[in-house]
Image (tube, grey):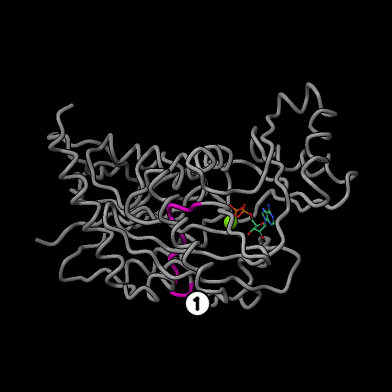
Amino acid sequence: MRRRVLVLMGGRSSEHDVSLSSARSVMNALDPERHEVVPVLIDRDGAWTREGRGVALCPGPDGRGVLVPLEGGAPEPVDVVFPVLHGPFGEDGTVQGLCDMAGLPCVGAGVAASAIAMDKALFKHLAHQAGIPVADAVVVTAGEWADDPDAIRRAAAGLGDTVFVKPARLGSSVGISRVTSAEDLDDAIRLALEHDERILVERGVRGKEVEVGVLGDHELVVSPPGQISYDAEWYDYETKYQAGLASLQIPADLPPPVAERARELAERAYRAVGCEGMGRIDFFVTDDGEVLVSELNTIPGFTPTSAYPSLMGAAGVGYSELVTRLVDLAVARAERTARLRR
Ligand SMILES: Nc1ncnc2c1ncn2[C@@H]1O[C@H](COP(=O)(O)OP(=O)(O)O)[C@@H](O)[C@H]1O
Ligand SMILES: [Mg+2]
């Protein structure tokens, strides 16, 4: 039976265009003998369209999700959803919850894991609890900043000469500042608070940036670490998305025990968060070989040159096989869940 795979793309986040590019690659790679692609675009305002016509995803008469044309007409059946959405309103558990409500298997992490991984403060708490090393940080809310900015300035000073100030729930380096002098801290905090009511001030770590890809539910494929190199102070928005400014080297230039440590921590972080399907775990590796987990992305980029598919390729899983396995994992997971007593 050919599965009807709803590929969700675009979305309301700043990563709209990256998502379109990722989704195009995913759709091309899904074997047409086994999959029928149902592309749905979410525009920047959040409206869903299928070939230019408004649609909504909701439970059908038998509780199984259908795509309903808003202008009338027959609902279209769907077998599985592949969200190729990055950032808020896609990678953060919201679309995953919609799929659950619509009774549809969804590729990748579920509601809780998506929400935890999206929230840098929650993720760091959880990683720390699990004994996974992360950079020291203080979490600040808009209310706390308004109440007692001096207390926050003191806490930030305690983190060292260089700190990174970032919104808790965003991506693509948007709203992030690298702060190297106390007088720039307030502006950095205000900027981050424009993007989220909860932000982090994090100790600046000097060293390499390294990424590890993970695929699977219980049995995991863990890639070798890849290393991001760029000619900039840090991996900011421009460096990430302007072609040619950053490069990925696989494997990373690390002594074998350090590379193994990164793989081990990637697997531990993945399991601690309760990830399913896929994840890309990002690290800092200091010059003396200390490995710190930075963040976990549950819907990593999927363009042909993106890190995640490249890392999986290095682990022996080609692009086409990767997307097929992700769909199979989602369907198998939904079948297991359907058998649970609840
Ligand atoms: N604590 C830190 N030390 C050094 N560099 C950091 C730190 N936090 C963030 N950065 C830099 O900022 C980039 C983006 O930060 P990150 O936390 O990964 O947010 P995003 O989710 O936007 O990718 C990182 O890739 C890194 O270059
Ligand atoms: Mg990052």
Tell me: 88 left or right of 338: right
| Front in this rendered view, residue 201 or 40 | 201
**Main secondary structure of the magenta stretch:** loop
| Front in this rendered view, residue 109 or 212 | 212
Up/down of 287 relative to 71, above or below: below
Q: Is residue 298 magenta?
A: yes
Q: Which residue position is annotated with label 1?
A: 250
The quadrant in which the N terminus is found is bottom left
Tell me: 196 left or right of 96: right
Up/down of 75 relative to 341, above or below: below
| Front in this rendered view, residue 329 or 241 | 329
Q: Position of residue 84 (x, y in %)?
A: 40, 56
User: Which residue corresponds to the image point at 83% horizontal and 34% vertical from the top-left?
Assistant: 154
Amino acid carrying mark 1 in the image: Ile
Q: State which region is magenta.
A: 296-305
Q: Position of residue 5 (x, y in %)?
A: 24, 57
Q: Position of residue 4 (x, y in %)?
A: 20, 57
